[in-house]
Image (tube, rainbow, N blue to C red):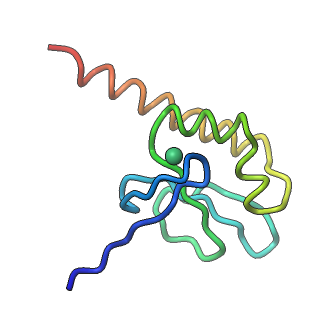
Amino acid sequence: MKEKCERMCICCRTRRQKSEMLRCVRQRGGEVAVDLKHSQFGRGAYICADVGCIKKVNKIGALKRTFKSNIKPEIFDCLDKIAKKLEDSFERSQEP
Ligand SMILES: [Zn+2]
């Protein structure tokens, strides 16, 4: 049987394949980082790779709640950039 790698989004609580999500991780020192390659060691949290969801995560402070630690502004910047990229590629794919 094929193993499903589904994870729950910390923002909207939807279950999706890992490949459709962004991973954030709390590293050993308690610092939270965006784990783009899904390879860092530590406690992870998943967010849909979706513009609406990423923005909502920032707004409701879901990361802070999940990791129970302060999130550096860089993390939000990084997520914002990813959201922007997703938005751009979505717009491009809509062009004829
Ligand atoms: Zn979500």
Measuring from the top left, give residue 78's x and y in whole percent: 62, 41
Measuring from the top left, give residue 3's x and y in whole percent: 29, 80
The single residue placed furthest to the top in the displayed view is 96
Measuring from the top left, give residue 28's x and y in whole percent: 76, 76
Q: Is residue 11 above or below residue 44?
A: above
Total marks drawn? 0
In which image quadrant can residue 69 be found?
A: bottom right
Say which residue appears at 67% left-offset and 57% top-offset. 33
Does residue 67 appear to the left or right of 12 in the view shown? right
Q: Quadrant of the N terminus?
A: bottom left
Does residue 7 appear to the left or right of 1 in the view shown? right
Measuring from the top left, give residue 96's x and y in whole percent: 14, 13
Does residue 79 appear to the left or right of 76 in the view shown? left
In which image quadrant can residue 19 be found?
A: bottom left
The single residue placed furthest to the left in the displayed view is 96
Q: Is residue 96 above or below residue 24?
A: above
In which image quadrant can residue 17 be found?
A: bottom left
Q: Is residue 13 above or below residue 3?
A: above
Say which residue appears at 40% left-offset and 67% top-offset. 6
Say which residue appears at 76% left-offset and 62% top-offset. 67
Say which residue appears at 45% left-offset and 38% top-offset. 50
| Along the line of sight, the residue nearer the viewer: 73 or 6 | 6
Does residue 91 appear to the left or right of 67 in the view shown? left
